Amino acid sequence: MKKIVILISGRGSNMAALIAASRAGQLGAAEIAAVLANRSDAEGLKIAADAGIATAVVEHRAYPDRVAFDAALAQAIEVHAPDLVVLAGFMRILTPAFVERFSGRLLNIHPSLLPAFPGVHTHAQALAAGVRVHGCTVHFVTPELDHGPIVIQSAVPVFDSDDESTLAERVLAREHLIYAQAVRWFVEDRLVIEGMRVRLIGGAQTDGSLRAPSWCDMADIKAGDTVQLLGLPDWLIHDLPVEEQEEMKSFVGGITKITEIDTYGYFWVSFPGHCFCVLREFIKRSPDSQAGQA
């Protein structure tokens, strides 16, 4: 059983998603041993405590410099003897000594398709640059900020009507999925770092690349399976005429088949006059005998 320590600074939405994934058995043979924060008012601490996970605070303002803080933080982490340290919205730049101490077992998630848009305000950067595709990246941490071997990425479309809030919401949904996948791969000893590349042992892809995400590893639903549509993402329908929005909403609760799972991890479904994609959270498996009732 591998032990995981999560570091947060605020609400910890990715932390909460990892806790939920752990409870659902989606992280493999691993336990989240502790959640540590650099702020005593980090909202995620209560979420972790309510889940029965040990928590601790190493307040960065109590230390004279980054070196002293990182040394104290490392000691607090080592108490739990983790196999993996996960940064989940941890808003501190780590010193090279800290990174080297946990080299090869320190993961971060960044809300952009690295190497594009490192640093902060990534969604504003994406909108200002006029990109049509944005997303998120899980990578091993190196001393250089937002720069390390990439484990997995996930892309989302950027719409003309997007603002920072709508784009951030769309990307965050992908973050919650691919971080759990990356952690599971680590737990299963399937990630091999080769320079600035990461090779997935036993991956479905034969060229060594890791596109987002490898659903043959993660999903319990495959192309051709019969599913029920549970809802529709707002970004899918918000630019449509009202009549068409209502028509698509009428499909919710209906039964259909997965026609394709694309390389970005979207599940494509078909209803009369419409073919569109949704995330895993918007569908559930349904008995084949119900197919055709939509």
Image: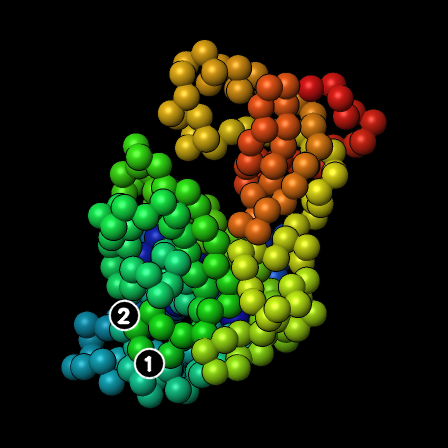
The secondary element bearing badge 2 is classed as loop
- Is residue 196 left or right of 20 when viewed as pictured? left
Q: Earlier in the sequence, mark 1 or mark 2?
A: 2
Alpha carbons under labels 1 and 2: distance apart = 12 Å
The secondary element bearing badge 1 is classed as loop
Categorize mark 1 by other alpha carbons within 10 Å: few (<14), some (14-19), many (20+).
some
- Kindly give the residue lying farthest to the right in the view shown: 289
Q: Amino acid at mark 2?
A: Arg
Q: Is residue 154 visible?
A: yes
Q: Nearer the viewer, mark 1 or mark 2?
A: 1
- From this view, report whether residue 75 is shown above or below residue 204: below
Q: Position of residue 43 (x, y in %)?
A: 34, 53
Please identify the quadrant where the N terminus is shown.
Answer: bottom right
Please identify the quadrant where the C terminus is shown.
Answer: top right
* Residue designated by label 2: 92
Q: Amino acid at mark 1?
A: Pro
- Kindly give the residue lying farthest to the front in the view shown: 207
Residue occupying image coordinates x 45% and y 83%: 103
- Is residue 110 left or right of 121 when viewed as pictured? right
- Count the marks: how many? 2
- Kindly give the residue lying farthest to the top in the view shown: 243
Residue occupying image coordinates x 71% and y 45%: 222
Q: Position of residue 45 (x, y in %)?
A: 38, 58
Q: Quadrant of residue 231?
A: top right
Frontmost residue, 120 versus 60: 120
Q: Quadrant of residue 216?
A: bottom right
- From this view, report whether residue 227 is shown above or below residue 51: above
- From this view, report whether residue 200 is shown above or below residue 265: below
| Rendered image: mark on residue 143 | 1
| Rendered image: mark on residue 134 | none
Q: Position of residue 223 (x, y in %)?
A: 71, 42
